[in-house]
Image: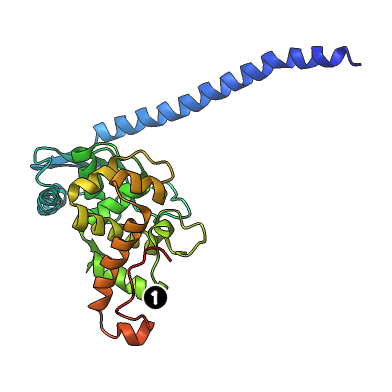
Amino acid sequence: MTRKGPCARGSAKPFVIIFLAVAAIYAGFLFYNGTIRRAVREALMQRVTSAHYEILSPSRALSQDAMTSFAMQRENLFMALDKKLGDADSNKEIRIVFDPEFSAPPASSDAVQTPYLVDGRTIRTKLIGQKPQLPAAADAEALLYAAWGKPGNAQIARWTANWLVGLWRGTEIGMAAAEVEQRLGHKNVSSLLIDPGGEISSPDDRTLLGAAWISEIAEFGGPDAVRKLYSAKMPHPAVAEVSKVLGTTPLELDRKWQLWMYAYLAGMPSIQQDSGMPMDMPMGGSH
């Protein structure tokens, strides 16, 4: 019995290796086959171009007039975003693919589900109806890639894109974040980054506060500080890592965020009555 055991295990090894190899080949075939099919499908789409955009959609899914109108309207957005980046990529082009068959990948539990996917300077989104629609943050994310390269962390990239737009569902980011702050109370930077205690249950609230925090970094440190943070390779960003990237301390990181946030809160009506928060609250860092 004991002699046969090793032989049996030894004879099984080649089958395991073969099985794993076949599985890897099959998985690779599915991936590349899907990529090739998508490339062929997009190559056959109708398209219109403008100074900074290439718009694609399946034949007869959208009229040429609708695609041209969308591209022209988007030019104004591109110029506003690029100006905020110091005209970093005035000659780059963003490619937007409207596809009725597009399906956005599921978001992680702590991220906002978006109706689009940004891959470098290409944006893919689902076409619904005859009027193409796309959140401005998608353009911002693609433009950031063109101007600053591949982001070091997807979450930071999404926050930075929303900072670049400057609005959250039609409201200036600082004021929108102040409303969340009134509702939830102040959240320090560590809660924004990792939130181990689940203090910010809504992915929308976390994304908004994250974009507001990037706005604070831009105000105190300028676009160069935002770019450092955007480019830093941090699989799981934490306060210590972020402080090192920005050349500051965790205490100072929280102090500036608190100071910036309270400046917005001070401008909101009934802040003292509704929250009971004293307006001369010391800026002592994290809570």
Q: Is residue 159 above or below residue 16?
A: below
The residue under the point 20% across, 52% down is 221
Q: How crowded is mark 1: few (under 14 residues within 10 Å), some or many (20 or more)?
A: few
Front residue of 40 and 273:
273
Q: Specify the farthest residue to the bottom.
A: 273
The residue under the point 26% across, 51% down is 161
- Residue 120 seen in the figure: yes
Tell me: 218 left or right of 198: left
Give the amino acid type for the residue marked by disc 1 in the picture: Arg
| x, y percent for residue 92 | 13, 38
The total number of labels drawn is: 1
Q: Quadrant of the C terminus?
A: bottom left
Q: Is residue 125 above or below residue 14?
A: below
Front residue of 185 and 68:
185
The residue under the point 47% across, 25% down is 28
- Residue 56 seen in the figure: no
| x, y percent for residue 73 | 12, 54
Residue receiving disc 1: 183
Front residue of 128 and 52:
52
The residue under the point 20% across, 44% down is 143
Q: In which quarter of the image is the N terminus?
A: top right
Q: How is the image coloured?
A: rainbow
Tell me: 33 left or right of 64: right
Q: In this view, does 180 lie above or below 243?
A: below
Q: Is residue 243 above or below residue 181?
A: above
| x, y percent for residue 268 | 25, 79
Q: Specify the farthest residue to the right.
A: 1
| x, y percent for residue 148 | 21, 39
SS at circle 1 = helix
